[in-house]
Image (cartoon, rainbow, N blue to C red):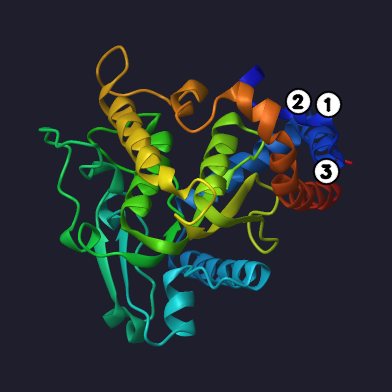
Amino acid sequence: MKSGRLTEAILTRGCPELQRLHELRAVGWQDEKLDHEFVKQRQVADSADGQLSLTWYKRMSQVMQEIDDYTQCCPGGFTSYVLRKNRYAKGVGVSLPAQEGGHALLLDYSLRSRLDLYSADVTGYQLGPYLIDHPRLSPIPLQLRFTSFGHAFLDGHQLRTQVSDYGAPWDIHRLLLSQLILALRIIRGGGSMVVKLSHPERVLTAQILYMLDILSEKLVIYKPGSMHATRGTFYAVAIGVGNGLEGVRLPQMLRGLQDLWVETTFGGELGQGRYMTPSDLNFAITVEDLEQTYLDRLIELGRNVWDVQAHALHRWFQKKGVI
């Protein structure tokens, strides 16, 4: 399967939204002007000043409002959104320290008393199924070991500006695994998880969606139109986690993710970790079973993402004179 994607299988099954997006992507890849645009966007993101960071902060709260309106599940959301919406809410968060390339805390001072924030690299917690003696690892904070939560929001993404003694290209996979493990450990039975993912047609993404789908009473995926609409990112909202048709498999899924976290952290040829591969998530569902039993459901879930991205790309290409 090319590039770990299910694109060909989905297009063969029939999906006009992905077909249109596929054609637009082909146009974009052939236009050199867009390469300069992408470089410029990355430079702006990597060197964002205080004012731009504040703008992004406000827009992310708007994204949470969009998700809440769309799902009607009040999934918890970004800290500012949930603390404003529910004056009794309290939360615990983990954020990469600013000195390691993370973002500064922009939460209003009036809300900070209800948030306990740990400045840490979440991938450096002891997230395996057993303790590992290694200087890069530290214990999970007590609040995240012995407290359960009604909502968990997984929005971390790999930063190009991050400074780490153990940084590796596959940290993008380790970060996703770390968030999933931590969330499944602390989520209360019947709680909700909001997970930022990208490209439903990717095999690894589809396998994670399948996992959330069978563990939860309801799974909705939504792509906000107010931010990053031209990109492949979206949010999966799992409602009633642990109460799904196969909710009893949650401990099995958690153990599979923990074993995989160990492998992506300390496996590989040099013992320094490695990228995930589709076969790594066979404990959830194999690629063959994805194509044979889950493709229609995946198309149903992904239509919104592909449609919103295609419309946004079309408008952007028109603005840039590409089409």
Residue 78 vertical position relative to residue 267 in the rendered view, above or below: below
Label 2, label 3: how many angstroms apart (C-alpha)?
14 Å
Tag 2 and tag 3, C-beta contact below 8 Å: no
Spatial distance from mark 1 to mark 3, Cα to Cα?
Answer: 13 Å
Whether residue 175 sits left or right of residue 205 in the image: it is left
Amino acid type of the residue tagged 2 in the rendering:
Ala
**Residue pointed to by mark 3:** 17
Residue beneath disc 2: 9
Residue at point 61%, 51% (across, down): 234
| Outermost residue to the top | 269
Residue 227 image-quadrant placement? bottom right
Residue 206, above or below 280: below
Query: Residue at image x 19%, y 52%?
Result: 140
Residue drawn at (44%, 54%) of the image: 242
Residue at image location 40% in from the left, 29% down from the top:
169
Report the number of numbered marks. Answer: 3
Q: Nearer the viewer, residue 199 or 323?
A: 199
